[in-house]
Amino acid sequence: MTAIFEPRNRALAQPLETERFHLRPVGPVRFLIATNRWRSDPDILTGLYQSPRRRSLWKWIKTGPVPNNRTRFAFLIVPKGSNVAIGAHTTKLQGYRSAFHTVALDDRDWWGKGVIVEVRARVMNHFFRNGEIDRFFGVVEARNVASVFNYRRLGYDHVGTWHRHRQNPTTGEVVDFLNFEIFRGKWEEGPFAEKCDAD
Ligand SMILES: CC(C)(COP(=O)(O)OP(=O)(O)OC[C@H]1O[C@@H](n2cnc3c(N)ncnc32)[C@H](O)[C@@H]1OP(=O)(O)O)[C@@H](O)C(=O)NCCC(=O)NCCS
């Protein structure tokens, strides 16, 4: 049965908070409005799809990280004291008790300020606690240095490389992809695990 017939997962689609941000769970319509600019932002498109080519709304709906709040969840990242989202973080349940993330910040003023590590750590604690998740994984283009650093900072292990996996349709460059994963046990021993009952 497809995800559309499953009940919403209200335990996971919950408002969250970090030191600097409110993380607001949204459905597909609010997500599409909030990420409308992503479809024509060359840096974000390259980070997500290795190509700066603009995406139509139709393609974004079909292939983008649009939440259904059953298997895919999205949180708008809103700085405290503001009402404007600076980006969005999504998490998709996929594989055996596993999940992976997608993120982008369209507000450049927030790049290089540790937003992803802070937000992702909170999301991971929430999913480990309230979802049937034992493992997070990520596949990232080797040249996406910020993402690679963020996975490593959070304690993910580099578990493999897909060499010459994809060709950039615009530049013709052939790029490698790195595979990362972390299991619950390692997370709980790491510095970002929430020890107290914060949810
Ligand atoms: C990824 C993104 C959200 C920025 O995240 P960020 O956490 O602000 O990234 P930063 O610039 O702080 O980089 C993270 C780390 O990588 C390091 N880094 C980044 N580029 C680097 C480079 N070229 N060389 C060395 N280190 C680099 C930073 O110094 C930082 O290290 P630190 O944790 O020790 O401070 C933003 O680039 C974005 O929206 N990109 C487009 C979408 C995307 O690529 N999403 C990820 C794929 S799902």
Image (spheres, rainbow, N blue to C red):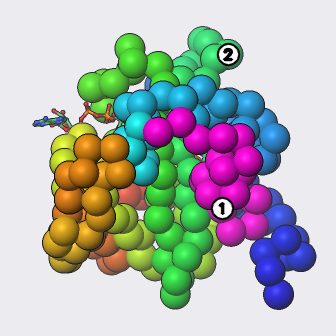
Which residue is found at the position 62% from the left and 67% from the top? Answer: 130
Quadrant into which the N terminus falls: bottom right
Type of the residue with mark 2:
Asn
Residue closest to the eye, 129 or 138: 138
- Magenta-drawn segment: 53-72
Residue 47 lies, with reference to residue 40, above or below; the image says below
Label 2: how many residues lie within 10 Å, few (<14), some (14-19) or many (20+)? few
Q: Amino acid at mark 1?
A: Arg
In this rendering, the answer to whether 129 lies above or below 142 is: below
> x and y percent of residue 195 in the render?
42, 58
In reply to whether residue 64 is colored magenta, the answer given is yes
Where is residue 38? Give x, y as percent. Answer: 55, 33
Q: Is label 2 in contact with label 1 (beta carbons under 8 Å)? A: no
Query: Which residue, given by chain and number where applicable, does mark 1 sit on?
Result: 72
Residue under label 2, please give it: 83
Rendered view: 89 above or below 130: above
Using the rendered image of the protein, determine whether residue 143 is visible from the camera's viewpoint: yes
Picture residue at 29% right of the left edge, 64% below the top: 166
The residue lying at 38 percent from left, 14 percent from top is 109
Cβ at disc 1 under 8 Å from ligand 1? no
Residue 68 on the magenta span: yes
Does the image show residue 151? no
Check the image and report above or below for 134 versus 83.
below
- Residue 184 versus residue 166: which sits nearer the camera? 166
The residue lying at 89 percent from left, 76 percent from top is: 5
> Reading the chain from its start, which is encountered first: label 2 or label 1?
1
